[in-house]
Amino acid sequence: MSDSMWGYNATSGHTTGADLIGYKVEATDGSIGKVDKHSDDVGSAYLVVDTGVWIFGKHVLLPAGTVKSVDSAERKIYVELTKEQIKDSPEFDKDKHVGDPAYHEQVGSYYQSHRRI
């Protein structure tokens, strides 16, 4: 897995320390929900997205490397994934997503395999 999966792309427009909670998240084919939690930690930056009614009661973990751009004025984050790819992602585990390298490896590998190059 590439370490870049867990870091924001330099061209994303993300500013370290910016509060992204509440931002809408847009897949390549439509809205998927809002940011519930995020981290800028070097090597493990991520978004936790509450998908709301789209996938009833599901949260998803998106590595920062999936972020294409951040629009602060519109409070939107655009990711380089389809809704289906996000829906089929590994189940979010709130107890493992912080501090479990094996879980990050599993999630990162899934998204790496679906990343557009």
Image (spheres, helix red, strand yellow):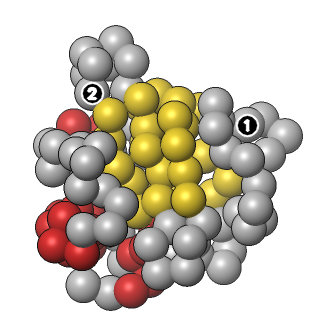
Q: CA distance from mark 2 to mark 1?
A: 21 Å
Establish if 113 lies above or below 68. below
* Relative depth, front residue between 45 and 101: 101
The reply to whether residue 81 is visible in this rendering is no
Residue 23: give x, y in percent of width and height: 64, 35
For label 2, the SS is loop
Secondary structure category for the residue under label 1: loop
Q: In the picture shown, does residue 37 fall above or below 98? A: above
Q: Is residue 109 left or right of residue 44?
A: left
Q: Nearer the viewer, residue 85 or 105?
A: 105
Q: Tag 2: residue type?
A: Lys
Q: Callout 1 environment at 10 Å: few (<14), some (14 to 19), or many (20+)?
A: some
Say the numbered circle drawn on residue 58.
2
**Amino acid at dot 1:** Arg
Q: Is residue 44 visible?
A: yes
Figure quadrant of the N terminus: bottom left
Task: From the image, state whether disc 2 or disc 1 is nearer to you.
Answer: 2
Mark 2 or mark 1, earlier in chain: 2
Label 2 packing within 10 angstroms: few (<14), some (14-19), many (20+): some
In this figure, which residue is indicated by the disc labeled 1?
A: 75
